[in-house]
Image (cartoon, rainbow, N blue to C red):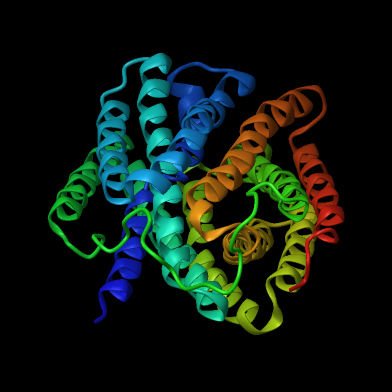
Amino acid sequence: MLPSRSAVWAMYVSHMFNEIYLFIHLALIPVFITEFELTLFQVSFVATVPTLIGIIMNIMIGFLVDRIGARPLLILGFICQALGGIIVAESWSFETLIFGLSFIGIANPLYHNSGLSTISRILSGQKLTRGAGIHAAAGSIGSSIGLFTLSLLLAFNRWRLTYLIWAVPTLAWALFLTRTRVLDQDKPGRKQTRDDGEGGSVLSRPFAFFLILVGLTQAGSSVITTFMTTYMVLGRGISEATASLIFTAGPLISIVGSLFSGYVGSWMGDVRILFVTIGITGLSAILIPVMPTTSLLTIMFVCFAFFSCTVWPPINSLTARLTPTEKRGLAYSLSQTTYQATSALAPPVAARLIETTSMSMMFPFSFMLMLAGVVFLKRVPMK
């Protein structure tokens, strides 16, 4: 296997490990409300604070990737992730819980800016779109593993073990990255042969409109992702273990959705596939609360999860296509910062809306955010 191909596959595996904790704290929101005696508004900060920490780190990490390369930041990210998992597992108060989740929040931009910039410097064109699909699928595998582990342990009321168990292989992967040589090629200043995105400013007009699109659509998705298990438990009377299991179906189907988007997008075009997937995601969101049975609700949530994950391969591909190669780390940090900022702000706003109306109001709120995002998609060049 060529060194460049080995580096790409190392990033796929890294993404899998990075996403293991991704949805666990969201699935545990009903548990946190009971165990730490929180209001819905207070518990919304479980999603918001780690994201805000990631935002603060994002731009700095983007600059560092372009200057010192991916390896040291990847290693630091997995150490932070494992440390955060251990702190959460041993948390005795809401404050220590947030403290541990914040370390996991730091790990997210450390990986994504490093991993995505590495892949985009090696792959191009249709290969990049397909590679982005495999990359997203690998992340979905990781988040599915984490949620499946949680579902098993919740049955025994041992949710903390989920964080503790996965801290060990995460540290082992960090150790592997210190020893492997497959990332040695990704040095700052290494010449890359690319026919797109060369030269110019990072924040071009099309890329600015693209960032607004990313922010709005991901804000809409984050509302449902954050409160879906809470809606199932408090709004539909489903047990916590069953709600967690249903929620696990989302990342599982996302594996297929990511591969679908990567391969279909490679011939359909990134902008076209993005328009279709955002539209179907919004439609699925608005239909979830009208499903009369748990089975139909599960089917519609799976549909939402399938199409909401399909936006990431074209988003990551377009980020590369709309920005200069030598500033790719900064470009991905801007994309991640925009997504994280709106995803951090949307849940508290939705929580206030829910507290003054009803839980089902989060679905039309999510739909309107996605619809607004589609407007800006028209400003992104097709080719």
Q: Nearer the viewer, residue 174 or 254?
A: 174
Q: In the drawing, does residue 35 fall left or right of residue 235?
A: left
Q: Residue 298 location in percent, x, y? A: 62, 59
Q: Residue 125 location in percent, x, y? A: 57, 77
| Furthest-bottom residue in this view | 267
Q: Residue 20 location in percent, x, y? A: 37, 50
Q: In the drawing, does residue 382 fall left or right of residue 59?
A: right
Give me the residue at 67% from left, 57% from top: 297
Give me the residue at 52% from left, 42% from top: 239
> Does 244 appear above or below 263?
above
Give me the residue at 36% from left, 53% from top: 188
| Furthest-left residue in this view | 179
Q: Nearer the viewer, residue 358 or 341?
A: 341
> Does 352 appear above or below 274?
above
Q: Residue 344 location in percent, x, y? A: 61, 32
Q: Nearer the viewer, residue 119 or 138?
A: 119
Q: In the drawing, does residue 140 fall left or right of residue 237?
A: left
Which quadrant of the rendered structure holds the C terminus? Answer: bottom right
Q: Quadrant of residue 300?
A: bottom right
- Residue 301 visible in the displayed image: yes
